Amino acid sequence: MESFSAILIEAIGLILSWDPDVIEIIMLSLRVTLTAVAAACLIGLPLGAIVGAFRFPMRTGVIVAMNTLMGLPPVVVGLLVYLMLSASGPMGVLGLLYTPTAMIIAQTILVTPIVAALTRQVIEDLNGEYAEQFASLGVGPLDRVLALLWDARYSLLTVALAGFGRAVAEVGAVIIVGGNINHVTRVMTTTIALETSKGNLELALALGLILLVIAVIVNGLLMAIRGTAARAAYV
Amino acid sequence: MSEALTNISAHSAVTSAPLLSARGLCFDAGGQRLIDGIDLDIAPGRCTVIMGANGSGKSLLLRLLHGLIEPTDGAVSWCGQPLDRAARREQAMVFQRPVMLRRSVAANLRFALSVRGVRGAKRKAQEEETIARARMDALKDKPARVLSGGEQQRLAMARAMIGAPRMLFLDEPTASLDPASILAIEQLIQEARDNGTTIVLVTHDPGQARRLGDDLFFLHGGRIAETGPIMQVLEKPTSKAAQAWLSGRLFVPNTP
Amino acid sequence: MFRRNFLGFATAGLLALGLTGPLTGSAAAQDNFIIVQSTTSTQNSGLFDHILPIFQDKTGIDVRVVAVGTGQAIKNAANGDGDVLFVHAKPAEEKFVASGDGVSRADVMYNDFVIVGPPSDPAGVAGMSDVAAAMAKIAETESAFASRGDDSGTHKAEQRLWTDAGVDVAVASGGWYRETGSGMGATLNTGTGMSAYIMTDRATWISFGNKGDYQIAVEGDAKMFNQYGIILVNPEKHPNVKVEQGQQFIDWVLSKEGQAAIADYKIDGQQLFFPNAS
């Protein structure tokens, strides 16, 4: 195996060469992951906010379930989605197996519990601060949830980021439901798995490095937004 | 002297129909009785002051009266009817530490207006009017949470006065403010009184109680130890608890 | 106001990322593809990258390859998740056809298996061509051997060879016989890491990039012949199968042109697969 500097040079070379295949893989990775995170937020944010803002029977059970589902093994999710979307499965007629949509579905299932559970925590803390004022103003349930979500928006960026981190680095689920088909469902992580199995460890690590850089950029952007918000005491 | 006379004559008005009443109000927490059988009536247009040592149950009583928490026993009635969410919308409360939404000054006011169903051009007009009345034009686009403590409390007062509530609960609104801010808040409270808002004020400051209040309830151990016109209780307290507190001593029952 | 802001926030985010567009190519190109369930050896060796563009240029059909172990490929195809099965485990393929999951089976090509090992050659099998004798020797000396252990075509072939050699590897599992439960590449990475002998198909070995100082120890036995077959998934059982395009692909692979394309694929001047369609 070569030294890390060789891997670094390979990674930089990969980016500089602007190889259309590599760019395609990076773009698909981002498209699948960001769509899945957006979908997970559409489900997880309201769900987490409702559980965080209200008291109801079995609430503790719901919280335990959400926290447990955060640790769902990706391979298990991949298998469940495969069984659903398989031609002999209940949703086989949709023909979604081995498409980016299938990968988005699997990652949405993986990320939604993370978004919901972390949102629940953030909203519960904020609700502790706001609850009396809201009760005094006579704020209704819908306005309350929306106001809490809006006021927690910068903290929730971090929640979305946690979901993004899980999704972008995940390989077990997307390789099963996507099939790692060249130019169709091949993303960064499945390419890394493939190149590793071909014994091209330098290329695999170089791709890993690019993945890391993307994660750093996304993190940096969100932290910059959060920093600006913190100066306005909006966090 | 004339002030005392007015107070006494006004006090006799308590016999007219009360705006808010509590009967047999009790509240337990952690196996302890924190509010122990309180009966009171608050007449419209008056400023009622609640005083008492730390832990005597002042803030708790205020929250029970405003309906923020449910009593263990007894009931609060509003205009002779049970207290519900609709009734609470005719009331407002300002807390010791103002709760500011993570938004601009103007957006904080907008939120309170929206909650009360005021929308569109009408909301815009009321928003500007409220900002002007609170003298916060220069601050309206600033994030509310970067304002000073005094400015935040002024905003909280302005927000509470939206929709002209009939009753305003104030829980030590000036406890951690500098003298200039205290003056500004007291002016706003006075304005509210002058506009006919009934006020229930919790304070530790006898001077403030004198400046603003008509009637006084003195709490001790979750019960009303003494009540009466404010000057009377402050100058000639009859209960041991009030005497001890006003002379700066800690009152423990059963000590000679 | 804040409600509108909130929705705006979410929508703007989605639009900015350009996520609302279609997720797969244009509508016209979307349907003109088939899915081939195949094995890691054909994929990792680069064979598909060589032959599929030729087929697509000719027919316009996009062949999407899902490369997994033969065992999983057959199961996926039996679920109807694919139009064509292209694997290397003849008995399992015949069972697949007999059970009605496949239409019929045809030989496509072969390559052969080899046993690779470390230069120290602890079992002293380097240069042997009698695979049964070599495997018996590995067992006797209890030299480390890394097996796929994943029910793949290679794994099944390896199991047959152990039986021929009269060795019961089940008792040695976890000892000198180590089952990785992974694909060929992963097993090669693991096996070379622990100086174990590994049985691999020659194509994967030639194209493998992490050989280290490993060399081929055992090769050339007729028993190590590795036949690939191709099967159209049965449309009577799985109505979603794209019969016409799938059959077109099979016909092409078995045609003179397809067979020539397979023979033509070389790495470092070595031919990896030998077409033998009848």
Image: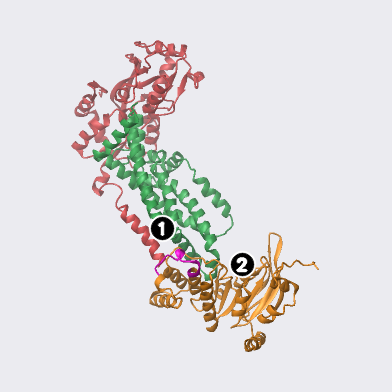
Chain colours: A green, B orange, C red
User: Is C123 situated above or below B21?
Assistant: above
Please tell me which residue is depicted at 57% across the width and 69% down the height of the picture. Answer: B175
User: Is B181 situated above or below A173?
Assistant: below
Q: Amino acid at mark 2?
A: Ile
Q: Nearer the viewer, residue C266 or C278?
A: C266
Secondary structure beneath dot 1 equals helix
Q: Nearer the viewer, residue A11 or A163?
A: A11
Q: Is residue C142 magenta?
A: no
Q: Which mark is residue B8?
A: none
Secondary structure beneath dot 2 equals loop
Percent position of residue C81, x then y: 36, 39
Mark 2, residue position:
B69
> What is the chain letter for disc 1?
A
> What is the chain letter for disc 2?
B
Please tell me which residue is depicted at 45% across the width and 50% down the height of the picture. Answer: A112
Q: Nearer the viewer, residue A167 or B191?
A: B191
Mark 1, residue position:
A229
Percent position of residue A101, x then y: 35, 47
Percent position of residue B64, x then y: 63, 70
In this orientation, does residue B145 appear? yes
User: Is C124 situated above or below A161?
Assistant: above
Q: Is residue B83 left or right of residue C110?
A: right
Magenta stretch, residue numbers: B140-151
